[in-house]
Image (cartoon, coloured by chain):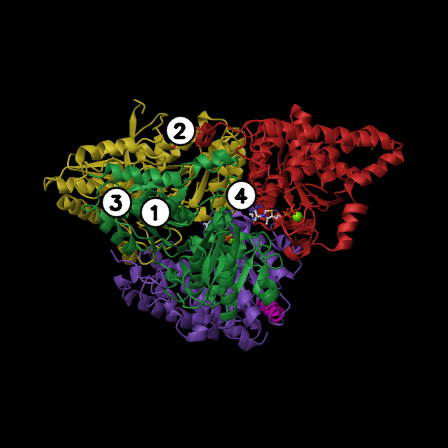
Chain colours: A purple, B red, C green, D yellow
Amino acid sequence: MQQDQLLDLYRDMWLIRAFEQALEREFEQGGVPGMLHTGLGQEATQAALASQLEATDCFFPDHRCHGINALAQERHKGDGERIMAELFGKSTGVCSGKGGSLHSADPSVGNYGDNAVEGSYMATVLGVALAAKMRGEAKVACAIIGDGTVGRGEFHESLNMAAIWDLPVLYACVNNGYAIATPVGEGHASADIVDLARGYGFPCEQVDGNDIVAAHEAVGKAISHIRAGKGPYFLEFKTWRWQGIFAGEFRPEAEVKYWREDHDPILLANDALEAMGVSQAQRSAIESEQVGRIEEWITFAKESPNPELAKATADVYVGWEVASS
Amino acid sequence: MQQDQLLDLYRDMWLIRAFEQALEREFEQGGVPGMLHTGLGQEATQAALASQLEATDCFFPDHRCHGINALAQERHKGDGERIMAELFGKSTGVCSGKGGSLHSADPSVGNYGDNAVEGSYMATVLGVALAAKMRGEAKVACAIIGDGTVGRGEFHESLNMAAIWDLPVLYACVNNGYAIATPVGEGHASADIVDLARGYGFPCEQVDGNDIVAAHEAVGKAISHIRAGKGPYFLEFKTWRWQGIFAGEFRPEAEVKYWREDHDPILLANDALEAMGVSQAQRSAIESEQVGRIEEWITFAKESPNPELAKATADVYVGWEVASS
Amino acid sequence: MSTSTTKRTSFTKALNDALDQGMDRFDEMFLIGEDIGEMGGDFGVTRKLWAKYGAERVRDTPLSEAAIIGTCVGASMVGMRPVAEIMFADFLGECYDQIVNNAAKLHYMFDGQFKAPLVIRTACGGGFGGGPHHSQSVEGWFLNVPGIVIVAPSNPEDAKGLLLASIESDDPVLFLEHKALYRARGEVPTGYYTTPLGSAAIAREGTDITVVATMRMVPMALSAAEALDADGISVEVVDLRTIRPYDAETVLASVAKTGRAVVANEAPKIGGLGAELSARIHEECFSELQAPVGRVDGLDSPIPFSVPLEHEILPDEADITAAIRTTMEASR
Amino acid sequence: MSTSTTKRTSFTKALNDALDQGMDRFDEMFLIGEDIGEMGGDFGVTRKLWAKYGAERVRDTPLSEAAIIGTCVGASMVGMRPVAEIMFADFLGECYDQIVNNAAKLHYMFDGQFKAPLVIRTACGGGFGGGPHHSQSVEGWFLNVPGIVIVAPSNPEDAKGLLLASIESDDPVLFLEHKALYRARGEVPTGYYTTPLGSAAIAREGTDITVVATMRMVPMALSAAEALDADGISVEVVDLRTIRPYDAETVLASVAKTGRAVVANEAPKIGGLGAELSARIHEECFSELQAPVGRVDGLDSPIPFSVPLEHEILPDEADITAAIRTTMEASR
Ligand SMILES: Cc1ncc(C[n+]2csc(CCOP(=O)(O)OP(=O)(O)O)c2C)c(N)n1
Ligand SMILES: Cc1ncc(C[n+]2csc(CCOP(=O)(O)OP(=O)(O)O)c2C)c(N)n1
Ligand SMILES: [Mg+2]
Ligand SMILES: [Mg+2]
């Protein structure tokens, strides 16, 4: 990978990290309503996807994809702060605060929205892909699913249908080792999700989701395959999430140390950049730049107004008004 | 296989054939309400299963399993005619006529009932198996599913859960080549269902479902495996159903000829018996005996009374009465 | 409704015509479901469309109800107009999440950025010995779900017009086809026309009592009304046609006129459509009402296989007649 | 209820005690759900039970809602008493078929040969910014389904007694736990006791008007009643406790006494529980009623993430108070 490209991805990863860390802080201070799941630790996987999906593609983010959502917004429209505002439930958010963390969408940047019934979009993605195929568009339709979400029956229905119809679907499985507190190997017949996907007969690949270079390359390969009209592709990213459960950290110390210290995606990229001769100062500048930008987004979100109350019953139906009392 | 055993199975297969043929006739004459799906052509698979599942085991029959249901009833309680009566909706039926073709059950012979939402019992079977495991019973819990039914998401949820919990489940997939009129290879990523099942890591095997010797042996092997506490087993029986669709026969002539003439399970068994020296007369006697018995069952069913009207609202709840008007 | 020529047509063929004319008119429309292609569907509603429009637009699927509806949702998010067939309404449980949490909510939760202009056609209702999993009336499963439109025709002309209106609708539509009506015949305009969603029809005018009915209960109510005419009871029959959002205006105007009402619906009574209509009528016509609103529904039970038992469970013309008489007699 | 000593206990802990005492008493009982084991469940209701009863009887599962309920159905068919946790009620769409077509029907369709003594516990309701998929009131999804029991406690004492009664019940129970009530505290008997299913409670006596409420609407109704006392309006509050089959007798007796009623339920109005109760009350208390039954419900909308918008959608004490006043004023 060229230095420029790696620097871009490094910048993207820092955007995610800064976003999620600031968000966690604000959440703890009570400014962010509802629940919060962060993508901390998964920045490389997210940046690899976000940097290669075009605005005309489609992705269904999962509950940890604030980072992907923000990057897509930033890259295609320059308004990543609207993802932050959505998380604060504000009128300036991408869904005017009606969706929140679990339902942020903006189709103009390819973001088709999370569905907090995790994994239901494994079925939905088929329709976007089918429409693209029927219309002869070279669109990639991507479903981002956690390892735990693979437990859903829709996994089978979706992979099977994508296979028989040769649909342009990219399954991006983010295997961070756990579903809440359940280890992937206890929840599934195999800790390697690709083992469950192989039977459908399309390419399945595992990649180190914390190695931005490897992850980026794998995504590129998968997207080329799909755009060439060769049908679905399954990618499993091995990664790890920093966030524990509400009770705190539940994973073995050595495991925590490995992932947070020895195999942190940003530190790994940092090392790679250093090896390429990018100076510490330059790297730090990227970090500060992104941290600073995110603080502006936080301010923007906080200062934005709540949606007008009339919004509450708007858009229940297209063809009917719903009474507001 | 010993001659005696093959003769028993031959008798079983004839019971199914006679049952279904008489039933088809009665259905056409308007005496059987609702819909009808027959197991004609699948007698070897059905006999192989029915002859080896004990009354203390459990099976969930599918919509073509009148034959299995009747054999189980006959073998364990000697009252196969109650399956026929159920199909006529009569009070003497195993469910007093409340279940019919698609919901005949009698747990005392191991028949846990079809669920006409095809495949939902792929989930239900887990519970019976889990209970057996928790109680230390050597029960086999068997789900009989068509190839088409494999499309259901529950296929994945069930196989995955059976695998992680090492449950005593026998998946008996009756691959008769079609779901209604959809060829198995068009409905699924693979025409060989075992390809979809292998990822879960327990034994999967394909067998000629029209070869009673092979089918019987495969079932025996699977049951031994399960009874030995070694966890789930997946069997795919390659077979073919005689019944077309409501519009009639839709499959290529050569295919029809192959399955109905060259590879009919009863003719195959007939040949095997002949090779063992069983006379034509002896074989014909079995046929007439079973045909005769089934005609008695038909008479029994026809002459049985309808359920009393008070049954209509009985047993909605265990703990409450439901008003009958 | 159009002024085109009409033709005597079955309910099934009227639906088939609607699909045909819709497919012809809307490039974004496609059909999807189990064996709807060459076979033409379990009830023949899609017959010949595969041959005419091809396997891409008349798309057979495996038994994957969640994926079928998921596919419709996704396709409709990008502007397609999918029409799914779920063979029996009883199987909607398999795709309940996709309908309730996805189709019904996405226009709202994503702040109007997506629409879900999909139609889910499905065969519902009992009366043919189909047993507990092939006979249910499922409108009650979706009645409390904002965002979904529920359409329920009672005759061939409406079936066609309402289906075309459903295809045109930008909201997700659950389109209920009562199995006992498939063979009903009537005059149906041959051209393209739509019958407005959310609008009830006065199927018969009357002055003494209003019967609000859906699907198969409409012909039963009409027949009951004819018979009661001889006894000097003048029955107005309102065919609700759209169950959600329903046409309260027409219903309430009729009851305001007659001062009495019976609601007739095939599903079990408790928590059913009859409850909603009864509550609404009582709320809004409290002072006009001369007797409490009568409810005619199925008994609170699954539907048994045995035909005589099924007959016990499901409401019929005699039940409607009895409810009308009771309501007339109870009037203050 | 037992006469044992009581202790001030949270709703969550009362449920936890019920599960603990049930597990202790019934060998056939087991718990199943996502992260209910070592973690103790998303809301902590199963806390410490994994340590006490082991992983066999307190069983973690993957995200496979259909398989979770399927497992419960199968296990209950052979006499086990499974208690499932579906983390959020919104996810019941995933296992709707198993509940409606399997659990609710099997006792009936197999002619009494099987029972389904299972309990599905689930966290429902809004008010915490959970957004459209973590805030729904789902009783309306199941109200029209014969064979299912729906239980909905409003306070810690009932929560424990009703959960133990649900575990003892031979019918399948959908047990609704309103998230906003988890932290509610109250005196709870420490021993084993059951609170009967199908039986409403008079939460407060009054003479002018009856408010029938469920779950979180009960404390709101009580608070409204207290405030209205000052204005000389005496409000009787009926806590329905079991939503299906519901205790019509208690409800109707109360309304017969007061002559006025308001029904309060958090779910959307159309086709909701309020409709059923309103219809029933009108039918049976027609001549006693001095005004139409008031309905207090959520607006006909999904639930938005934004807290102020959510507040617009969900009913609250002020809405109950307003409905009581309107009903009082409308009285003839
Ligand atoms: C259908 C469904 N079941 C359960 C949940 C509750 N839930 C939210 S996230 C989660 C764990 C998901 O695990 P995984 O897919 O591995 O994602 P991760 O949080 O590890 O990134 C669960 C059980 C849900 N949202 N949807
Ligand atoms: C969930 C569900 N979807 C659809 C149907 C309607 N249906 C009944 S049988 C059948 C085909 C099943 O095919 P297969 O499993 O291969 O069984 P076969 O009839 O070939 O033996 C279908 C689609 C059903 N009963 N349940
Ligand atoms: Mg995970
Ligand atoms: Mg088949």
Question: Left of A141 or right of it: where is B145?
Answer: right
Residue D147 in view, yes or no: no
Instruction: State the mark number for residue C260.
Output: 3
Within 10 Å of disc 3 (Cα), the crowding (few <14, some 14-19, many 20+) is: many
Give the secondary structure at mark 3.
loop
Distance (Cα) linking label 2 and label 4 = 30 Å
- Residue B321, labelled with which disc? 2
Which residue in the structure is indicated by mark 4?
D67
Q: Do labels 4 and 1 share a chain?
A: yes
Where disc 4 sits, the SS reads helix
Q: Position of residue D135 (x, y in %)?
A: 36, 50
Chain hosting mark 1: D
Which class describes the residues within 10 Å of circle 2: few (<14), some (14-19), or many (20+)?
Answer: few
Residue B227 in view of the camera: yes
The reply to whether discs 3 and 2 touch (Cβ–Cβ < 8 Å) is: no
How far apart are the two marked residues, 3 and 1, measured between alpha carbons?
Answer: 37 Å
Q: Where is residue A62 in the image (x, y as percent from the top left)?
A: 47, 59
Q: Give x and y (percent) for residue A135.
A: 55, 72
Which segment did they paint magenta? A216-226
How far apart marks 4 and 3 lie (CA) works out to 48 Å
Residue under numbered circle 1 = D125
Of the residues shown, which amino acid type is indicated by label 4? Answer: Ala
